[in-house]
Image: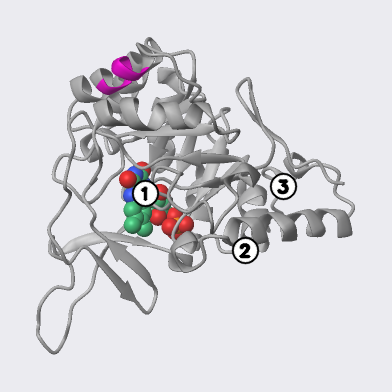
């Protein structure tokens, strides 16, 4: 049996298949469809200080090359997350990573402080500084090195749990933002969030998304995700969690070769909520057939022609 376990800072995950924020709710919605105990980790949907209804519809559209969403961080708010979700997580074996979003440094800090003030078994935080779908969804942090480093270091002071900064592909130089995250004390970065996109109905001449622009996800963005991970891999020493367009075990292997130490599956969960179990099963077979003892031995091993 190949060793599928992966290590991020001091935390060991039994396998590298996580589910991505916003595509798996709070991790408790579909117990009959997916055995969450098999997952490496669940990243819960972005939580803000106050509850949010999100953007008006239409906020999801399927295109020929992926899904565009503009959910706009609809969520129950941190108080309800603490009162309703944290107790449920106490009874789950699956590691929970809480994703936090905010429109100001204060908001990120306040949300994390509230969670740190209560007892819980969550293993870490993923900080969404890359939401393209709200006017103030952290993107001003995700495109600015100084703000990223400052935010990371302020949050670092608040927690000993895993601190993961989630990066946007919608920037000139994603490596620079990754370096700022590392300098600020992040344990890892995750990449990528969605790619800004637009969809138009030629007949009605309307934009198919209320907010005009949304975030493209699914297989179409896998090449973007791989490139971002590989660029970042050469510039930081902290682990990278690869995200974007993963639908099968081959995609996982490719993300590892590019430099990821684990992955998150997003949009594919909508098509088949049990997809991660299949990916895990196939990944195991792949490694055994190729006599690869440990998945971690593949990290960054892509052969390039230069
Ligand atoms: C409907 C939807 C909602 C999402 N909501 C969030 C969110 O709340 N927070 C976040 O950090 N990312 C969110 N994302 C981005 C995903 O976590 C992921 O980074 C992105 O979809 C790329 O992965 P994929 O191609 O496998 O879907 C969302 C994506 C989708 C499709």
Residue 275 shown left or right of residue 296 in the figure: left
The quadrant holding residue 76 is top left
Where does residue 77 sit, x and y in percent of width and height? 23, 33
Residue 229 shown left or right of residue 306 in the figure: left
Q: Is 173 covered by the magenta stretch?
A: no
Rounded to the nearest angstrom, the CA distance separating label 1 from label 3 is: 30 Å
Furthest toward the bottom, the residue is: 203
First of labels 2, 3 by sequence position: 2
Tag count: 3
- Kindly check if marks 1 and 3 are in contact, taking CB atoms under 8 A apart as contact: no
Magenta stretch, residue numbers: 111-115
Residue 306 seen in this snapshot: no
Disc 2 packing (10 Å; few <14; some 14–19; many ≥20): some
**CB at disc 1 and ligand 1 closer than 8 Å:** yes
Where does residue 164 sit, x and y in percent of width and height? 45, 30
Which residue is under mark 3? 301
Which residue is under mark 1? 22
Which residue is under mark 2? 248
Mark 3 residue element: loop
* Nearer the camera: disc 1 or disc 3: 1
């Amino acid at each position: 049996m190949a060793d599928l376990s992966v290590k991020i800072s001091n935390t060991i995950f039994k396998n590298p298949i996580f589910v991505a924020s916003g595509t798996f709710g709070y991790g408790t919605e579909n117990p009959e469809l997916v055995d969450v105990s098999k997952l490496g980790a669940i990243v819960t949907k972005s939580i803000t200080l106050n509850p949010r209804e999100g953007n008006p519809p239409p906020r999801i559209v399927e295109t020929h090359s992926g899904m565009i969403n503009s959910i706009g961080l609809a969520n129950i708010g941190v108080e309800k997350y603490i009162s309703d979700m944290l107790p449920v997580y106490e009874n789950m074996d699956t590691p929970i990573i809480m994703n936090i979003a905010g429109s100001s440094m204060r908001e990120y800090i306040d949300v994390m402080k509230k969670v740190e003030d209560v007892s819980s078994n969550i293993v870490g935080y993923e900080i969404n500084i890359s939401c393209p779908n709200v006017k103030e969804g952290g993107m001003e942090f995700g495109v600015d090195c100084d703000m990223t480093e400052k935010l990371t270091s302020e949050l670092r002071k608040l927690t000993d749990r895993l601190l993961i900064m989630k990066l946007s592909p919608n920037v000139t130089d994603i490596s620079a933002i990754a370096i700022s995250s590392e300098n600020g004390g992040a344990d890892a970065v995750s990449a990528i969030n969605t790619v800004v996109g637009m969809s138009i109905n030629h007949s009605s001449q309307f934009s198919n998304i209320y907010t005009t622009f949304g975030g493209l996800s699914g297989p179409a963005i896998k090449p973007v995700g791989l490139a971002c991970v590989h660029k970042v891999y050469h510039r930081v020493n902290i682990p990278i969690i690869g995200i974007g367009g993963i639908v099968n075990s081959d995609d996982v292997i490719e993300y590892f070769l590019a430099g990821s130490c684990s992955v998150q599956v997003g949009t594919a969960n909508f098509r088949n909520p049990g997809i991660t179990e299949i990916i895990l099963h196939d990944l195991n077979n792949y490694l055994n057939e190729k006599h690869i003892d440990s998945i971690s031995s593949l990290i960054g091993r892509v052969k390039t022609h230069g």
